[in-house]
Structure formats: structure tokens, C-alpha cells
Image: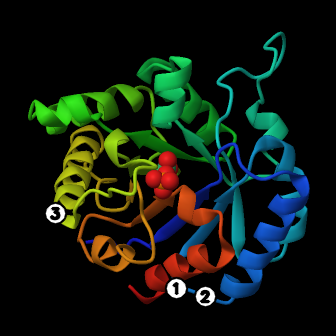
Amino acid sequence: MATRTPVIAGNWKMNTDVESGLKLAKGIAELSGAVGGVDKIVCPPFVSIASVAQALAGSSIQVGAQNVSANTDGAFTGEVSTSMLQSLVSHAIVGHSERRVLYGETSVQVAEKAVAAANAGITPVLCIGEDLSVRKLGNAESFVAAQLEASLSGVTDWDSLIVAYEPVWAIGTGEAATSDQAQEMTTVCRQVIRSLAPNAADSVRVLYGGSVNSGNVVELLAQPDIDGALVGGASLKAEEFSKLIAAAGAS
Ligand code: PGA
């Protein structure tokens, strides 16, 4: 089986301004810059990407965007293209549940974004996950499998892909999935990848996201199919985020 370098990615969401974002990035670099054996990524808001990228240039901390347009350029007010981001970021989150739920993003659009990002040399961090009603009905596995398959439509660059299983009910609630639940669902994600690209299934990193913190990260990362974490709230404090990085580096 391929060895998969763990990933800790921080999704700052719509938090921080340019000044506090810069401070946070520098704090993370100071505390975690020397930690090896883990891919470390911060995803600031668009307005901070340039300054954070500049501050982290030459460090081991990578920068990601929280979203990206599937279109190349033109009349798309408020959107940000891959070519604008190309020189600044290595990764882009696509299909976060907040974008799916609040802004009506469909899996078709998510797949287009993932393809656009990969074509520009930006690794998509593609999010999928069920909400509470789906889980209560016992349909989490089939829902996530279908959502992931649809969100991977047209994806061919399996070397440039990270998948993040993020149950909607665990995001920002303080109630993370149990390690068993997260393992079960990341296995489902890997099965979907295997069905689409048998050779890639053992090398694509599959992350868990949803209320990850320094108290639960070790157990989550110990699961064989969980290759890291996509982190919201706990990524906004340099010390806490660095604990997650340290745990992943040691895992
Ligand atoms: P959370 O967010 O860690 O605050 O639950 C995770 C995410 O939305 O990526």
C-alpha cells in the first residue's frame, strides 16, 4: 500500500482581516515550520491570500484558497479564477458544505471547479458529507458515495486531489464524528475512488473534517483510512493548530 503523507489543512472561513491573518500565519510558521512528515496548509480569505503567501514564502506552510471559479476569466462578478490564484496557492477547497448549502453549489459545479483547479496545477481539496437527516435515516454511506462520485465527474488528475469527508452535523458543532464513524466513511470515499481509478485509490489522501481539535485528533488520525484533517475553528489559533500539526507529524 502506498504511504500517504498526512495533511493538516486550516480553513479560516470568513474570519480574520489582513492584519490578524498575517499574524496567525506567522504564528503557525513559527510554531510548526520545522515539523516534518505532514503537509501543512492554511486557507485564508481571498483578501489575505497574497500577504499570507508572501509571509510564508520559503516556509514549509502551504497556502490554499477556500473556493475557486470554474471559469477562466470574464464577466463573473465576485469570482476568483485559477489563473489569479496560480502563483499564490498550492491548494483550493472546493465543494465545502457551507458553499453547497448556503450558496447552492451543486456537485456538477464542484466537479468543474476541481477540474479547473487541477488543470492550473492547484490541488483541489474536495469536500463531501451528509447532513444529520441523511445520517438519521441510515443513508450516510450511499449519500456520500453518490455525492463524491458526482463531484469527481471529469476528474482525471488523481495525483492532484485531496478528498475531505466532512459530515455537516459535525462542522462547527463541537461534536466530531467518532473515529469509527469517520473511518467507516473515509473507507466509503476510498471505495468510490477505487471504482473510478483503481490505481489511485491507495495514494489519494482522504481527510476527516468536523470539530477536529487537539483532544480528538490523535484518535482520528490513528484510523487507517484517515490521512489528515480539514480544520475550521481550531485553525484560527496558532497554538491549537500547531498541536494538530504536531500530532499528524508524529502519526
Ligand atoms: P470545524 O470546521 O473544524 O470548525 O468544525 C471544519 C470545516 O468546516 O472545514
Residue mark closest to the camera, 1 vs 2: 1
Q: Judge from the rendering whether residue 104 lies leftward or rightward of residue 236; answer left or right.
A: left
Q: Residues within 10 Å of mark 2 (few under 14, many from 20)?
A: some
Callout 3: SS: helix
Callout 2: SS: loop
Query: Cβ–Cβ below 8 Å for labels 1 and 3?
Result: no
Residue position marked by numbered label 1 in the rendering? 246
At label 3, which amino acid type do we have? Asp
Image colouring: rainbow
Q: Can I make out residue 193 in this image?
A: yes
Residue mark closest to the camera, 3 vs 2: 3
Residue at 36% in and 40% down: 168
Q: Which mark is residue 180?
A: 3
Query: Cβ–Cβ below 8 Å for labels 1 and 2?
Result: yes
Q: Choose the circle earlier in sequence order: 3 or 2.
A: 2
> Residue 251, percent across and down?
38, 85
Q: Judge from the rendering whether residue 227 lies leftward or rightward of residue 119; answer left or right.
A: left
Is 107 in front, or is 236? 236
Q: Residues within 10 Å of mark 3 (few under 14, many from 20)?
A: few
The residue positioned farthest toward the left in the image shown: 138
Is 66 in front, or is 216? 216
Q: Judge from the rendering whether residue 181 lies leftward or rightward of residue 68; answer left or right.
A: left
Residue position marked by numbered label 2 in the rendering? 35
Distance from label 1 to label 3 (Cα)? 22 Å
Distance from label 1 to label 2 (Cα)? 7 Å
